[in-house]
Image (cartoon, helix red, strand yellow):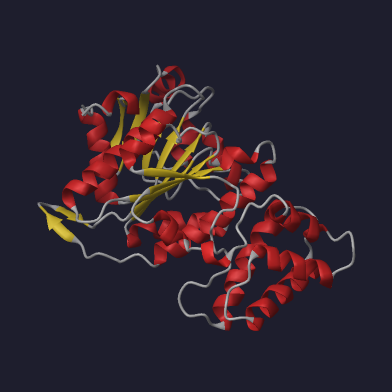
Amino acid sequence: MATQDLMLAVNAAITLKRPLLVKGEPGTGKTQLVKALIWQLRVKTQQVQPTPLTALILDYKHDYQDDEFLAAVNGKVLKPHKIPLDIFRVIGENSVPNRFMRTNAFIDVLKKIYAGIGPVQRGKLQKVIMDLYAASDNAPTLKEVAAAYSTAVPAGDAVVAILNNFVLGEVFSSDRSELKTLSELIDDSVLVLDIDAFGADQQSKNALVALFLNQYYEYMIQLQKWPFEKTGNVQLRRLNSYLVVDEATNIMEYSFEVLMRLLLQGREYGVGVLLSSQYLSHFAPSGGDNYGQPLLTWFIHKIPNVVLGQLHSLGLPAANVGDVTRIMTNPNHVAYYSSLNFAGKFIRGNGFWERKQD
């Protein structure tokens, strides 16, 4: 059975459709809590709405790919080999402005994660991709972009090496008959992207995550906006989907605008965002975006060296010195929980393996 406290948290997530944060040291129960939340959200939405909750999980550590979890949530795993995602397909009107926005979003990912992409390379890559759009009724594949760019620039250009890293490793499929939109890949399931399968190449992992964040944003804005329905004194709206970013610090350091847009705009489209990380400092990096401010629901497991000012600056003004002491000594699976109508309380969230027997 789900604990009363965790069901309270699940109901809040369904009601608020606002971003959630799960934090704590390794081994404190973060992953088990996230699994339990996704499973409970999936079950709960099936009980109260005609379409099930979908989810995209960006899995850096192979934590969400066991058979038991996948079977419970109707999950499927996407490996970073011949991913059948049509990454340059324009969603909506196939106009030049929309092609240009898709092109710039792709280049922005490369520019922020990899060194050596300056204004000249950016301009050349823009021209190559836009020319490929103009030459065919189909969106270009990444393989076509890499080939066209390599013929347009001198040997030794940094972008050639970056693109070839994905093309030679066959990260994305180049078979047009296989290519789909992210919406088609997710369907009505929980889609787990296996980032860990990239091995030790952290830059490529982060680039893949950023590309999927862009795709998920476009997926989100195509979702139906359901009207509010009043239940008692609460205004409810159907929950469409959840985005889970595991080890979110890996991507937050780059200050991608799309992540902040997902956090701020998700509620409008019935989309929730769940970020999981190890330390509070990850959410307000020096000189970067403060990702803590849009977060309305927090689960903070054991974290060493937390200070009261951190909690206040991240949007937890009700936290006190006693809460800080408990957070630093929390036993496994116990978390400081705060949400819109709850100033802060410590709850024990059952792990996924405990609640799957319901």
The residue under the point 17% across, 50% down is 48
Q: Quadrant of the C terminus?
A: top left
- Vertically, is 94 above or below 358? below
Q: Position of residue 72 (x, y in %)?
A: 31, 36
The residue under the point 69% across, 52% down is 113
Between residue 127 and residue 67, name the one nearer to us. 67
Image position of 239 (left or right of 177): left
Between residue 101 and residue 178, name the one nearer to us. 178
- Vertically, is 37 above or below 271? above
Please tell me in which quadrant of the rendered image residue 97 appears. Answer: bottom right
Image position of 16 (left or right of 48): right
Image position of 290 (left or right of 346): right
Residue 18 in sight: no
Between residue 264 and residue 248, name the one nearer to us. 248
Q: Position of residue 323 (x, y in %)?
A: 38, 25
Q: Position of residue 112 (x, y in %)?
A: 68, 55
- Vertically, is 197 above or below 3? below
Between residue 295 and residue 146, name the one nearer to us. 146
**Total of numbered circles in the picture?**
0
The residue under the point 33% across, 41% down is 73
- Vertically, is 268 above or below 35? below
The residue under the point 12% across, 52% down is 233
Q: Position of residue 2 (x, y in %)?
A: 23, 29
Q: Residue furthest right?
A: 155
Q: Residue furthest left?
A: 232
Q: Quadrant of the N terminus?
A: top left
Residue 299 in sight: yes
